Amino acid sequence: MIRVSNLSKYYGGKRALGPVSFEINDGETVGFLGLNGAGKTTALRILACDLRPSSGAIEIGGVDGITDPHEVKKRIGFLPENPPLYQDMTVLDYLGFAGELRGMSRAQVKRRLPDVLEITDLGDVSEDVIGTLSHGFRQRVGVAQAIIHQPKFLILDEPTRGLDPVQIVEMRNLIHDLKQNHTVLISSHILTEISQTCDRLLVLGKGKLLGSGSENELAASESEIRQITVTVRAPSGEDPRATIRKVLEAVSGVKSVADPYEQGGGLSYALSTTKDCRAEVSRAVVEAKLDLIQLAYSRSELENTFIRLVGGADASN
């Protein structure tokens, strides 16, 4: 298990992270989700004992990450956003070097290499120089160096960064395989990757923990934002924008009204609402003697939840 309590990191007087607290159970795959600069990389580097926090406590696998970081590192495999690869080494030589750095004997590395090459599908390029490999294969080498010593915990920082669509699917499949034997922590700002890969999400914004839970748990929170799209037409010869906005904003449950766009001979408005208030919206439009052309409703999914959470963080800073 990973336990984090009141963790903070400052660079000079600037806060990059915290204070944040959370727990990750053994066997979970947890996604750190947030915009660029949200604190995801800082959090993962601290958990990987690659960066020392300014304050707070970390316990990983029963070991104190502050007082005994070297012991923690034995339990962790870390893929940084930019994998630490030596471009002039072959894949086999580099993985052997990475294994020995983590305290493995040459005999242990030799026994472990076939499994690692199979898991990461690097067998066909194992004798190739890393600098000649495609970006996708280099990412796989980065994953291979992270698992060479069979760590219990695996930390992947933006593992699909810079990959093409085919390579993203391949990396996603690789992560699914890794979930069978590791507790996996992944950072990303790509919502679909997090949604399809992780059991639970930690949403970060401006260094703060904005939400925690499964996708369904986050979307079902009391502060859930739903969206109603309404298309309205007013009598010809009038500019109804101000009138329509006033009518829609007065409806109970409507949180905000976006600027309209023309569609289907009318004006379409996207409404953020705290409940399903389609009946109230349609009634208000008709009572205002406006033509109701279309009304659509959608519950908040991960993208809307993410926008709600990080939008709230931006608004408070």
Image (cartoon, helix red, strand yellow):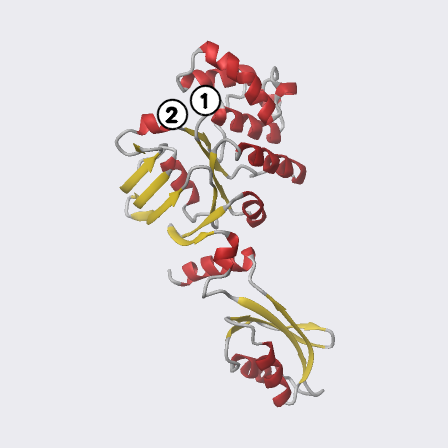
Question: What count of labels does the image hold?
Answer: 2
Q: Residue at left 63%, top 28%?
A: 134
Callout 2 amino acid: Lys
Q: Residue at left 45%, top 65%?
A: 222
Q: Give the spatial CA distance, label 2 vs label 1.
A: 8 Å
Within-10-Å neighbours for mark 2: few <14, some 14–19, many 20+: some
Towards the viewer: 160 or 146: 146
Which mark, by number, is residue 82? none
Q: Give residue 203's position: percent from left, percent from top.
A: 45, 51
Q: Give residue 140's position: percent from left, percent from top.
A: 57, 28
Residue 201, above or below 239: above
Residue 308 visible in this rendered orientation of the protein: yes
Q: Give residue 13's position: percent from left, percent from top.
A: 28, 48
Residue 163 visible in this rendered orientation of the protein: no
Q: Are marks 2 and 1 in contact (CB under 8 Å)?
A: yes
| Residue 100 falls in image quadrant | top left
Mark 2, secondary structure of its residue: loop
If the image is split into quadrants, where does the N terminus sit?
top left
If the image is split into quadrants, where does the C terminus sit?
bottom left
Callout 1 amino acid: His
Please give the residue where the numbered disc 1 appears in the rendered image: 149
**159 displayed left or right of 47:** right
Towards the viewer: 85 or 175: 175
Mark 1, secondary structure of its residue: loop
Q: Residue furthest top?
A: 107
Residue 24, above or below 259: above
Q: Earlier in the sequence, mark 2 or mark 1?
A: 2
Q: Residue at left 50%, top 61%?
A: 220
| Residue 102 falls in image quadrant | top left
Please give the residue where the numbered disc 2 appears in the rendered image: 74
